[in-house]
Image (tube, rainbow, N blue to C red):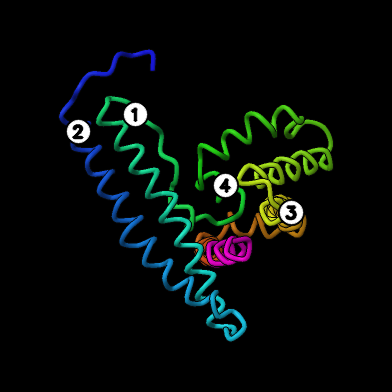
Amino acid sequence: LLEKPVFRGENFREGMFLILQGLFKKIVLGDNMGYVVNTGFNHASRMGLVDTWIAVAGFTFQIFFDFSGYTDIGRGSALLLGYKVPENFNWPFLAANLTDFWRRWHISLSTWLRDYLFIPLGGSRGSKWLNYRNLFITMALGGLWHGAAMHFLAWGAYQGIVLILHKEYVRLLDAIGVGKQLKESPALAKVYHVFSVIATFHIVCVGW
């Protein structure tokens, strides 16, 4: 904002591309995914295991296409006016763990939560348990940021718990030497990475 915006042709082209990309995500992908999701959850009592997972996965992608779609439209509109807004979603469903997911998903929100809640609470300073407390409080309040309702608080608390469990899981792997084995075997590390991405996606789906 300190620099006076100047019209540039490349900004116009990139901005229009982002706007069209965002509209495609929102209208073609997100809205149509919504029909599948609503069909499932409107008949929840009759859904089986497979139906439920299809509806939950569909809801996950619906949220992503909605959020990233309107973000693209916003970033593109800003570019038309000469302002560059940072990217807000960076392939979140390729994240290999929950910490990585929150570095890729709704980056502006997760960065704000880190800078204005987690760090002022004490961040990673102090004992392990103080770190976990700060992480849990941050994510629970991040849930309430979405709306003052119990299901948002529960979702935020869930995110805090799974982030803490991931940190403990990493400690366990290091303690039994798995981390060292993965570093020494690129092939094993690739297989582990693929399974980690799949597991992370399902953990995220359960949260939604």
Residue 190 sits inside the magenta stretch: no
Quadrant housing residue 76: top left
**Residues at marks 1 and 4, CA–CA distance in whole angstroms:** 22 Å
**Residues at marks 2 and 4, CA–CA distance in whole angstroms:** 30 Å
Amino acid type of the residue tagged 3 in the rendering: Ile
Label 2 crowd bin: few (<14), some (14–19), many (20+), radius 10 Å: some
Highlighted magenta segment, given as a residue range: 195-208
101 relative position to 169: left or right:
left
Label 4 crowd bin: few (<14), some (14–19), many (20+), radius 10 Å: some
Q: Residue at x 41, y 34 (%)?
A: 86
Q: Tell which tag, 2 or 4, sits nearer the viewer.
A: 2
Question: Which quarter of the figure is the C terminus placed in?
Answer: bottom right
- Return the residue at label 2: 12
Q: Residue at x 50, y 46 (%)?
A: 104
**First in sequence: mark 1 vs mark 4:** 1
**First in sequence: mark 1 vs mark 2:** 2
CB contact under 8 Å: marks 1 and 3: no
